[in-house]
Amino acid sequence: MTDDVLVVHGGTPLEGRIRVRGAKNLVSKAMVAALLGDSPSRLFDVPKIRDVEVVRGLLGLHGVKVTDGTEDGELVFDPSNVESASTDQINVHAGSSRIPILFCGPLLHRLGHAFIPDLGGCHIGPRPIDFHLQALREFGATVEKTPEGLHLSAPNGLHGTKFALPYPSVGATEQVLLTAVMAEGVTELRNAAVEPEIIDLICILQKMGAIIKVHTDRVIEIQGVKRLHGYSHRPIPDRIEAASWAAAALATRGHVEVLGAQQADMMTFLNIFRSVGGEYEVTDARPPKLSDPGQEGGIRFWHPGGELNAVALETDVHPGFMTDWQQPLVVALTQARGLSIVHETVYEQRLGYTEALNTMGANIQVYRDCLGGTPCRFGRRNFKHSAVIAGPSKLHAADLVIPDLRAGFSHLIAALAAEGTSRVYGVDLINRGYEDFEAKLASLGAHVERP
């Protein structure tokens, strides 16, 4: 693992400006959507992250020609020669991403069959695909489980259905959308996820010719169409990455401007950030003029000095506090005076990263009880999904091993905030969701290096 470690000399505030590109949780799904078109699609502002490489490879295996466009971050997809891929080829990508499950609907429409390998992704709980498979069966797909994965077919085609999700799962909602748009008849999805990335995916599908209505109370209605064409789309910026840099600014007592960050998609985070004692300013875009190149808008985040405040928060589906926001923020909460409470209601095993923070001097206790009022699936089920953070705590350097993507960035923030030199192992996992993060750290004045 010596080639997958970052040496972090902590104790220096992060200062400067970085930019976030298209949202990781949208871009990969937009790439899959290109399979449904009968003409090329163009996607802009695509970050150079590992998840994009994985989906690009999977598309290539299925005959989609993916090329770089003329603009930096632009990808062009030509789906005119979609074909089957061998299970051996697909299995090369198994374990590196959970995106393959979303290929089911598009491949069933284009080819009449699909193969999905065992799924990987971050180890933050089982994240079963039962919702996905149940939805696909409702559309008329047959699913055969084999040792190497899942074989799907649709001998009678796919047909619209009425379907209610037991939980507003983002992935299952994406599955229904990507399958329903070309299924015969009307599909009604109840208890759907309505995250900004979901709405942006709906915008892409609508550009392609889909008919999708978003009703109140998490109801989405899709009227199937016979054909879809390509799209041209610039995705929403990554609100998870933006919040991660905001938390890093707060934890290191620094000042970071995140160009591209959008206030509307981060309102819940911004409220908590301000409650903790952080400050932010939304900076509007400045259009270019003859003598001025202009500047992209964003949000400036900084620690105003003085003590931070303890808070109580609960993660939830949108518009609640995003589960991917809590790990970076918890590092900053170790520096707040008093007892902060975090109740994780989305993933049952997402607080394991706190053990590493405790070895660095944090005081965090995790509990099986639901420490909050939000309805939770994990109460009385033996999952440690609530945390109490006592602060402020003086963090010191340590050797850290990254367990998953978001926890990994939290470990990195902790190392930056701590006194002394830390070694962070497994750091390449962060490349799954944070584009060029080492160069961004350097531009913010962080003292990091590969050994």
Image: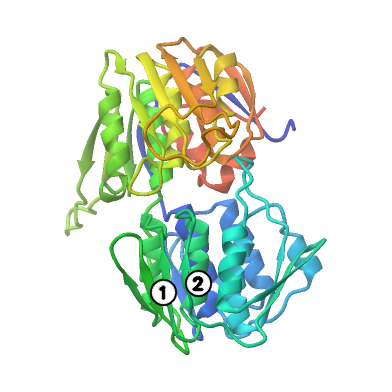
Residue 243: quadrant of the picture: top left
At 80% from the left and 62% from the top, the residue drawn is 148
Callout 1, which amino acid? Leu
Q: Can residue 68 be seen from the camera position used here?
A: no
Gap between marks 1 and 2, in whole Å? 8 Å
Q: Nearer the viewer, residue 220 or 445?
A: 220
Q: Are marks 1 and 2 in contact (CB under 8 Å)?
A: yes
Residue 339 location (% of width, % of height): 38, 15
Of the numbered discs in the image, which one, if any, rests on residue 205? 1
Of the numbered discs in the image, which one, if any, rests on residue 178? 2
The answer to whether 139 is drawn above or below residue 43 in the figure is below
Q: How many marks?
A: 2
The answer to whether 172 is drawn above or below residue 223 in the figure is above
Residue 154: quadrant of the picture: bottom right
Kindly report which numbered mark, 1 or 2, lies closer to the viewer in this rendering: 2
User: In the rendered image, which quarter contains the N terminus?
Assistant: top right
